[in-house]
Image (tube, helix red, strand yellow):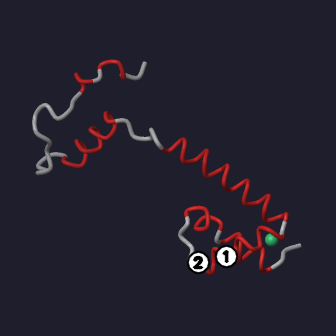
Amino acid sequence: MSVPLCDLVRDRFDDYHDGLLSPSLAEMVQGHLKTCSACQEEYRLLVSCIGVIRGLEAPAVPPRALRKIVDNLSGPGGGATLPDGAGGPDLEPGLEPS
Ligand SMILES: [Zn+2]
């Protein structure tokens, strides 16, 4: 059982959460949330998911991995080398995988 307006509103939850909707659309979503308990629940779930996902994303790329990626990208003959001392294995000896 699906009400078209609910689908419409749920499609915009992401942008609504991030404040990316135009004022009239945001008002539409907000107004619907006030009257539709199913969408309220859906939005609550989405917000908690976003919180978890963004929490996980923050430390996703440690500097060491970033350095590795840059090394790979610059590759043999590549011109994008970092200056000496910009980073390297000896900077973070504790991070070796065991
Ligand atoms: Zn709804």
Residue visible at 66% across and 71% down?
11
Residue 98 is left or right of residue 16, and the answer is left
Quadrant of the frame with the N terminus: bottom right
Nearest the viewer among 35 and 43 is 35
Question: Is 62 placed above or below 95 here?
Answer: below
Determine the quadrant in which ligand 1 lies: bottom right
Residue visible at 11% across and 49% down?
77
Three-letter amino acid code of the residue under disc 1: Glu
Q: Tell me the tag on residue 27.
A: 1
Question: Which residue carries the number 2 mark?
Answer: 23
Q: CA distance from mark 1 to mark 2?
A: 6 Å
Q: Would you say the residues marked 1 and 2 are in contact, meaning their CB atoms lie under 8 Å apart? A: yes
Residue 67 is left or right of residue 28, and the answer is left
Nearest the viewer among 90 and 36 is 36
Residue 90: x %, y % from top left: 22, 22
Nearest the viewer among 9 and 87 is 9
Residue visible at 36% across and 23% down?
95
